[in-house]
Image (tube, rainbow, N blue to C red):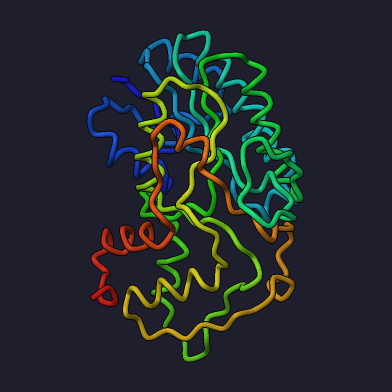
Amino acid sequence: MKRVLLIGGTGQLGTAILQRWSECDIVAPPHAQLALEDAERLGEALDRIRPDVLVNAAAFNDADRCETELPRAFEVNAVAVGGAAGLARDAGAVFLTVSTDYVFDGRADSPYCESDAPHPLSVYGVSKLAGEYLVRARRGRAFVVRTCGVYGSSGSSRSSFIERLLAHREAKPMKVVADVCASPTFAGDLADALQRLVRSEAYGLYHAVNTGAVSWYEFAREAVRQAGADITLEPIPAEQWQAPAVRPRFSALSNAKLAGLGIAMPSWRDGLAAYLGSLGVSAGLS
């Protein structure tokens, strides 16, 4: 793996890939120059750049907006992903795209494996699952990697959940959902795992998350503790959040298949500590 064409380089995962895949020659055009859904331009870029790997770290991942912008959700998360997989196959490149825990309905009581049947509850989840199926249908050398709650620094103006949490300066407590459990994942850890996965050439569907299941409230509490911040949190039920898109109540993922390749992921606490360290925040760790 020497040359990489990266779509979505300004997002949290894309930024981490640019920082951590240091041995690769990465070409990461901004969205204005090359969008995943512009098949003609993408084909031209593949012909010109001739990458070993095409990485899609872009998505329409605003789950609530997907509920009202269904055509765009399917154009970006499904049709464009399948088209990119076909273009990569024809160009002789490996294709890697990132999917989501939202393909599951959250009724499980233990972390989901790749063999568990998906049952998405939202337009976002359905569109991402459709993208998975379209990649599989192209029959190329491809990786589809489901992850969960990715956070990290980015080249865009959008801040992470942790950054918003630590920036909370209001006297009233910050409300955080306490009855939704997931596997929040540091983008740096995910980028490292993806690089090793691509090198394995063991194509297919994988889960890659920081290990362990935790509620968003407990995750926020641990972030405040590790940062040594004086921030009060208020646990609330998901119903009180009143978001348009239905979220799975439990969407932690299992890394067992990834571990079978010898690729280990840190725990969610270690991922959080690494991220805070990258921000220069570690007051509560001593």
Residue drawn where x is 48% and y is 72% of the image: 220
Residue drawn where x is 56% and y is 20% of the image: 85
**Residue 245 seen from this side:** yes
- What is the quadrant of the N terminus in the image? top left
Please provide percent x and percent y for residue 167. Answer: 39, 75
Residue 135 horizontal side relative to residue 58, left or right: right
**Residue 10 seen from this side:** no
- Give the quarter of the image for residue 242: bottom right
- What is the quadrant of the C terminus in the image? bottom left
Question: Is the residue 93 above or below the residue 161 in the image?
Answer: above
Q: How many marks?
A: 0
Please provide percent x and percent y for residue 159. Answer: 43, 60
Please provide percent x and percent y for residue 261. Answer: 43, 30
Question: Is the residue 89 above or below the residue 230 in the image?
Answer: above
Residue 24 horizontal side relative to residue 269, left or right: left
Residue drawn where x is 40% and y is 71% of the image: 223
Q: Nearer the viewer, residue 235 or 92?
A: 235
Please provide percent x and percent y for residue 111. Answer: 61, 51
Question: Is the residue 137 above or below the residue 160 in the image?
Answer: above
Question: Is the residue 269 above or below the residue 136 in the image?
Answer: below
Residue drawn where x is 55% and y is 68% of the image: 216
